[in-house]
Image (cartoon, helix red, strand yellow):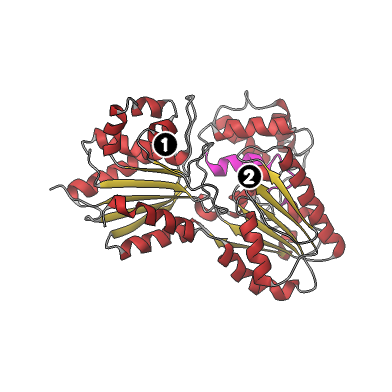
Amino acid sequence: MRPAQLKEKIINVSLNSSSLYSKVKSKARELAEFLKEGYLVISMGKASMTMFKGFIDGSGLEPIEGLIVKPRGLGYDVALDKIDVIEAGHPLPDEGSLRAGEKALTIARRAGELGRPLVVLVSGGGSAMVESPIEGVSLGDLVTINRLLLNSGASISEINVVRRHLSRVKGGGLVKASGNVEVYGLYASDVPGDFLEDIASGPTAPDPTTFHDALEVLKRYELLDRAPEGVVKVLRKGEEGALEETLKPGDPRLRRVTNVIVASAFDVVNGVAKALSEEGYNTIILTTTAQGESREVGKFLASITFDIIRKGVPLRPPAAIVVGGETSVSVKGHGLGGRNQELALSWALELRRLGIRGDDALMIALATDGIDGPTDAAGAAITPGSIDLMYRSGVNPVKALIENDSYHALASVDALIKTGPTGSNLNNVIVILVSGHEH
């Protein structure tokens, strides 16, 4: 089967492999015996609805009280009593995020008052969607600092260092609020390395970083002078010891906390690799922790593709390279796009520069949550031959890349992938298929 014919199969396998319902349901069965006297639940993030349903169906137990925080516009059909559903913003926090943050802290405290376990279901997107800022930081401050960080090229790990130190929820904040009860955190990882403190900024996880580290991130990306005054003031107070730090590794309160990663990008990458091997492709999982500037990662992956085409290394065609991770974009232009779209456009441009212009190589770069950047696309599927088609349609792809306008360049050749929100979030998957070998 040629690369173009595999496109839909790869997309479907990626989305099916990222489904969280069955994974959470299985873990809930294991925890049911500890919850039969009653428990409270908080489910947050892009997969909050799916994880909540999986937990209820797996445990067979309805919670005493609960909260679901979901992205705006994502439908739901929960009909349980005492379960509040709050819609909140992503990738930037909004008023709903503040309501969700206060409600989450209330439920955590309520668990402590009742002496009942607290279950926290966590998926990507929770950092923006659930927020209760430290005194002195406003919603406007949070929106500004998040926008600056997201556009700076900082990694998600670096961004979350700052987020954790501006919040009463993040960095183990829900553990602090819950008193002396057992806390069970079930995490769906959307971050490279699967570090708990980075998944929705770790509301039940210890945080190894400090206020000083947060200030260093702002300095590193030259944001200290552009950051809101309230943000800088809070971080400096924390650095001076005037504010309580986030929950740290080794804290005695962690003895009553059980955190588990129920799913990660590896599940998606492994599922895709298996499907491609069954199709007869020589397949390798290159990494599940790809990071870096999208256009630079795209160029690097193009060099590997070029070697496969021209030299048959590291794999002989038909060959498949599968990658998981989360790249970043330093936004300097005024266009529209996302990390996967920019990576895909850069990959195709670099191959064309190297003299590859056909359709024997295909890249699919896909966000498993169905949302790539501030667009309605989940990513892109492109061949080197698409670049010449862009020029013929009157689009200059080089200029588009410079202007961070990958969306419109890809749209001109029908290369965008649109799935709509998937209700899941296990990071990004990138697949490169090469069918031919040039001797």
Residue at screen point 22% across, 55% down: 317
Residue indicated by mark 1? 342
Residue 219 point in image, percent of width and height? 58, 30
Residue 208 visible in the picture: no
Residue 387 point in image, percent of width and height? 29, 34
Residue at screen point 18% across, 49% down: 311
Q: Is residue 310 above or below residue 271?
A: above
> In terms of secondary structure, where does tag 1 sit?
helix
- Inspect the image, locate mark 1, and give the three-letter code of the amino acid beneath it: Glu
Q: In which quarter of the image is the N terminus?
A: bottom left
Residue 298 drawn in magenta: no
| Region rendered in magenta | 155-173
Residue at screen point 37% across, 60% down: 273
Taking depth in this image into account, of 116 and 160 the one nearest to the observer is: 116
Mark 1 or mark 2, which has the lower sequence index?
Answer: 2
Image side of residue 269 versus residue 222, left or right: left
Image side of residue 121 versus residue 434, left or right: right
Q: Residue furthest right?
A: 113
CB under 8 Å between callouts 1 and 2? Answer: no
